[in-house]
Amino acid sequence: MSHANEFSSFFPAVFALLLAPLLLGVINRTKAAFGGRCGPPLLQPYYDLRKLLGKGAVYSRTTSWVFRAGPIVALAATVAAVLLVPFGPCGAPLHFAGDLVLFAYLFGLARFFTVAAALDTGSAFEGMGASREVFFSALAEPALLLGLVAVAKATIGGAGGFELTGLHQHVSGALWLDAGLVLLFVAVALFLVLLAECSRIPVDDPNTHLELTMIHEVMVLDHGGPDLAYIVYGAALKLWLLSALVVSVVVPRAPHPWLDLGVSLASVFGLAVVIGVVESSMARLRLTRVPQLLVGAAVLAVLALVLESHT
């Protein structure tokens, strides 16, 4: 199903670039509601980004160009990933056979430079966080790729070359009737990957300052000013993209383009509320339990792929 005549293919990128920080505001307000507080304004993430962009940056003499390039390259890779993800009635601005593999590798590139910047400081503390980040991402990436491949086989039978836009446009109510269990397994797997990749509870806490439990936060402690703004904005974009992928799997395409767009937007922000509920109702897992959670996500993706191969 395509509505390219009524919507520009650049709409998904525009929505992601403009609305991604709002997801953080929705999560924070949800958590505040569960705590009986008013919480910060919904637009607080935008205010924080503006404040950080107006500040200066301080660099240690022990760091090299790698430390300065880390936030910039990570944000550039995430913005490039924005061009590959469809949304609502719109296909992605850039789509081709096998683009889901490039999508995963762009996230890997962003992670590599973030880790390299952390190691460039020479701090054993940041090295600890970088080691955890790499280990957990190595467990999350198979679940992401296998889950997307399972949905691609269910929707287009692999004939479309495992293209994210083709996958997105063929998720329908009829597909849920035919391969509902496959889509359910993949949706749960992708949601767990989202929590891990975006440093959310129960895997990580983006607001924590406990030295022995930090993962992502510890890698960016030495960044400030515009560099920290790039990191925070990149994290918001990553949250939007993975939320859009989960919505693509769970929500069937609506017949009318405006209805499809409204349902997709409501679903993404509804998923942000769900993340806030999860973070408000459970504690972080012990670090030794996180690999079990991610392996479980990979197992669900494998089961989905096996089920689809035998139908």
Image (cartoon, grey):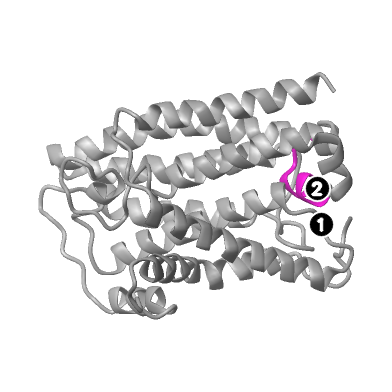
Q: Where is residue 89 in the image (x, y as percent from the top left)?
A: 79, 63
Q: In this view, does 95 lie to the left or right of 55?
A: right
- Return the residue at label 2: 171
The one nearer the camera, 188 or 248, is 188
Mark 1 Cα within 10 Å, few/some/many (few <14, many 20+)?
many
Q: In this view, does 299 lie to the left or right of 71?
A: right
Q: Is residue 262 left or right of residue 116?
A: right
Quadrant location of the C terminus? top right
Prevailing SS of the magenta stretch = helix
- Residue 310 within the magenta-colored segment of the rendering: no
User: Which numbered dot is residue 27?
Assistant: none
Q: Kindly identify the residue that appears in the image at 43 percent across and 79 percent down.
A: 43
Sequence-wise, which precedes: disc 1 or disc 2?
2
Which residues are drawn in magenta? 160-169
Q: Which amino acid does label 2 sit on?
A: Val
Instruction: Please tell me whether residue 57 is drawn above or below residue 190 in the rendered image.
Output: below
Q: Kindly identify the residue that appears in the image at 71 percent across and 36 percent down.
A: 98
Q: Where is residue 224 in the image (x, y as percent from the top left)?
A: 23, 64
Mark 2 Cα within 10 Å, few/some/many (few <14, many 20+)?
many
Q: What residue type is labelled 1?
A: Arg
Q: In this view, does 258 lie to the left or right of 225?
A: right
Instruction: Please tell me whether residue 306 is drawn above or below residue 149 in the rendered image.
Output: above
User: Which numbered dot is residue 253?
Assistant: 1
Q: Kindly identify the residue that appears in the image at 44 percent across and 66 percent down.
A: 24
| Residue 193 visible in image | yes
The one nearer the camera, 12 or 192, is 192
Number of marks in the image?
2
